[in-house]
Amino acid sequence: MGWVVELPRFARIVICALFGLMLTALISPVVDNIYLNNFYSPETAMLPALLSSAAGVVVYVIGWRVFVGFAGERPRFTRALYIYLAIGVFITVFALTLFIFGLTRR
């Protein structure tokens, strides 16, 4: 599994972005539903999108720290990276599965 840290920097950035986007897409309907059923106000209509996006950015920043690294830094395969990749792959597979089943059931 240590081969993932040998990927080019751009590929690692894309993987982190994918994990963040998939989490955002996965939790957006849940956040929207909770917000519309319990807290809706026309003044705060943008709040669910901001919360979902913030969660995606947090996943991206965590990935940047443990997977991409800063300029000139080569990431090491650590337990934190393993956990990040496992959760990211789970989120991506789960979200894609829901999207595919949602599209095929129309």
Image: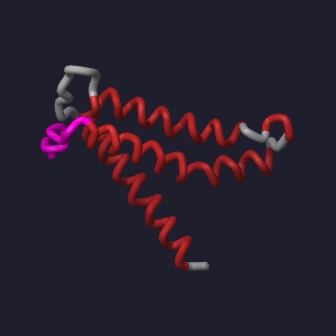
Q: Is residue 25 above or below residue 103?
A: above
Could you tell whether 9 is left or right of 29 in the image? left
* Residue toward you, 60 or 10: 10
Give the quadrant of the C terminus. bottom right
Question: Which picture quadrant has residue 15?
Answer: top left
Picture residue at 71% right of the left edge, 53% below the top: 33
* Residue toward you, 66 or 46: 46
Could you tell whether 24 is left or right of 11 in the image? right
Q: Is residue 33 above or below residue 9?
A: below
Residue 96 x, y percent position in the rendering: 44, 62
Residue 93 is a magenta residue: no
Q: Is residue 95 above or below residue 11?
A: below
Which residue reaches farthest right? 42
Picture residue at 69% right of the left edge, 49% below the top: 32
Picture residue at 85% right of the left edge, 40% below the top: 41
Part of the protein shown in magenta: 1-9
Residue 81 x, y percent position in the rendering: 27, 36
Residue 1 x, y percent position in the rendering: 15, 46
Residue 6 is a magenta residue: yes
Residue 8 x, y percent position in the rendering: 20, 39
Q: Is residue 70 above or below residue 98?
A: above
Picture residue at 36% right of the left edge, 46% below the top: 87
Question: Which picture quadrant has residue 13?
Answer: top left
Which residue reaches farthest front? 10
